[in-house]
Amino acid sequence: MAKTLFEKIWDRHLVRDLPDGTSLLYIDRHLVHEVTSPQAFEGLRLTGRGVRHPELTFSTMDHNVPTDENRLNIQDPISAAQVDALEKNCKEFGIKLYGIGDQRQGIVHVIGPELGITLPGLTLVCGDSHTSTHGAFGSLAFGIGTSEVEHVLATQTLRQKKARTFKVEYTGKLSPHVHSKDMVLKLIGMIGTAGGTGSVFEFCGEAVRSLSMEARMTICNMSIEGGARAGLIAPDETTFEYITAKDRPFAPKGEALEKALAQWRSLPSDEDAVFDRTLTIDASKIAPQVTWGTSPGMVIDVDQPVPGLNDVAGYSAADVRKALDYMGLEPGQKMTDIKPDTIFIGSCTNSRIEDLRRAAAILKGRKKADHIKLLVVPGSHQVRLQAEAEGLDQVFEDAGAEWRWAGCSMCLAMNPDKLAPKERCASTSNRNFEGRQGAGGRTHLVSPEMAAAAAVEGHFVDIRNWNT
Amino acid sequence: MEPFITHRGIVAPLDRANVDTDQIIPKQFLKSIKRTGFGPSAFFDWRYLIDATPNPDFELNKPRYEARSILLTRNNFGCGSSREHAVWALAQDGYRVIVAPYRGEGDDHIPGFADIFKNNCSKNGVVTIELSEAEVEEIFQAVFAEEGLEASVDLAAQTLTLHKADGEVTYGFEYDPSVKNKLLNGLDDIEESLQYMEEIGRFEANHNTWIHAPQG
């Protein structure tokens, strides 16, 4: 029978179907960070259980870490305690840790692919909803809660119900300066933030095939914002090139790589495979996207005005009113008239080297507007080093940006980088929820190019018509 | 986990759609390394004013809902972050049941709760009930109309009964049989799965070793 990519990975990891109707699914890689793991390790201690496969478990610190030059010395005692707990737990259970100051430290979803931990055909989990990022490799990757983190630590498996499959095909070619961030925001605007609930997306079509691995990661990263726990892209030569072109310490090499490649090539969905749902989007018609509300589904083409109360499919007039009040916006306002105070370029969605290159190309030889605070935060220490080798740090600093060390930074305000109440931010991150970047803060989600151009002009611009 | 068999309590309305887990428990509380102490911080930014006193405008702060244990809300509850802290906060704040509407039928069916959140609830003895939008609207109206309105949930029978002054109304709901069994019996997932360790070992022996074992 013809199978989808999802079904192939599922079948290859099925330990057994359980009497209660769920399935025991084998987990190949488990990524761990400081926020969602301490209670899981404590659970193991209380029950006297161990970690079944410490060598398949990888750990880093990202959410709490400061990103300024004093990052090694965390001032907040509660953050420091959480980071210390991870260090202690990793030591006790024999788990590899890339802590603050380590050359390989970074946002968990940036370092996984970077180190070759993320590979096609694997199952990969992490106590973090943006684990969907790793689906860009054709790896079934999804976020789990802390109870499940403990379950994976103890058994290297999860009890799962098979998800439905949802094929999202992007036909045609993207316009210049429109990127994968716009592709995924457009999708979420169309289906809503619950549209993919219960499903796993498979992104395909010409516009997806022509994306780099890093651009693919951006789309898969925000699958969860469309309600789907996981998003998949079939591995192809672009994937294999990414894995083999650089030294990725945990990726297979030599004979092991040959075997792996043979298996990876068998992963793509069969031509006649049947999906539970399908949606086709014409990529050539996608405009740069900007969110105007407090949910990633509240998003619009940059050349459109802020919508009216009754003009937003999937949201009630009351929801829209509440969101606009929070955001300090009115229906009919031009998106390009909106002036951010802060620009944040970073997060597991858009902090990789290509994102920084795109932002730097916009900022080169230019200055940020006077009223703007501009923060550029690489996703990993390796990304930081690469950017510096290319001179991007100088471009950012010349433009008036703060060039930081790796971490989640202002995406979620668990560290010193956060918005003040009513502070307006153009952010390359993934969530514009109320208070996400700091209590009372106002977030507009955009691509790195859109963020950089807004920094220069002091307001949003339609990057397609801008003087790039 | 403590079994969930039946529960009766006051219903409190949270008339908002797409309530994300950042709202249920804001980030500053995720720094704790404990599993307890989250209850008073549930819905923190809505629940308290800047000076940390209760916000009188927040619907759940109304005195009539003080003794509530059933939360009634709109679609896509618990979206966003995977933080189980959101469920710990609700459970520790006294909620045993959450009711939200699903949308659409058949292939267009959209569940009332976000996946990871619902899953996390199942690990903490919190029952997530999905009814149609019309049924949830009816319950909202009943709750607004009658102070102290109680509902009872019978998980085995898969019913929610509204004890209105002018008579009871009962709604049936679907429930995943595996989760139902786990909740009714208070089963611990890890304990259950550990029974299969031999099988897991056999699976590992045949698994793709060239990618199973990291090289680094």
Image: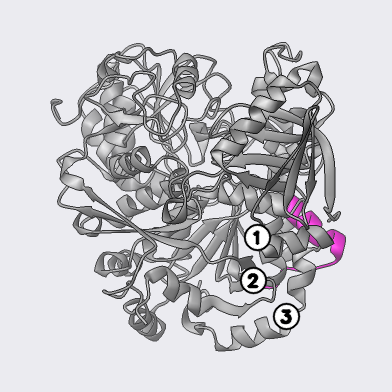
Q: Is residue A414 visible?
A: no
Task: Using the numbered discs, state the Cα–Cα distance from disc 3 to disc 1 in whole angstroms.
Answer: 25 Å
Q: Which of A253 and B172 is in front in this view?
A: B172
Q: Give residue A187's position: percent from left, percent from top.
A: 33, 44
Side (left or right) of A220 relative to B12? left
SS at circle 3: helix
Tag 1 residue: B176
Q: Which residue is drawn at 27% across and 30% down?
A: A450
Chain ID, mark 2: A
Disc 3, disc 2: CB below 8 Å? no
Task: Tell if the residue under mark 3 belongs to the same chain as the one under mark 2.
Answer: no
Tag 2 residue: A21
Task: Using the numbered discs, state the Cα–Cα distance from disc 3 to disc 2 in whole angstroms.
Answer: 19 Å
Side (left or right) of A428 relative to B164? left
Residue type highlighted by circle 1: Asp
Task: Look at the image and give the residue range highlighted in magenta.
Answer: A39-52
Q: How is the image coloured?
A: one colour
Q: Residue at x 76, y 17 (%)?
A: B62
Q: Which mark is residue B197?
A: 3
Q: Give residue B103's position: percent from left, percent from top.
A: 49, 43
Chain ID, mark 1: B
Q: In this view, does B210 lie above or below B64?
A: below
Q: Is residue A44 magenta?
A: yes
Residue type highlighted by circle 3: Met
Chain ID, mark 3: B
Mark 3 or mark 1: name the one nearer the start of the chain.
Answer: 1
| Callout 1 crowding tier (Cα within 10 Å): few <14, some 14–19, many ≥20 | few
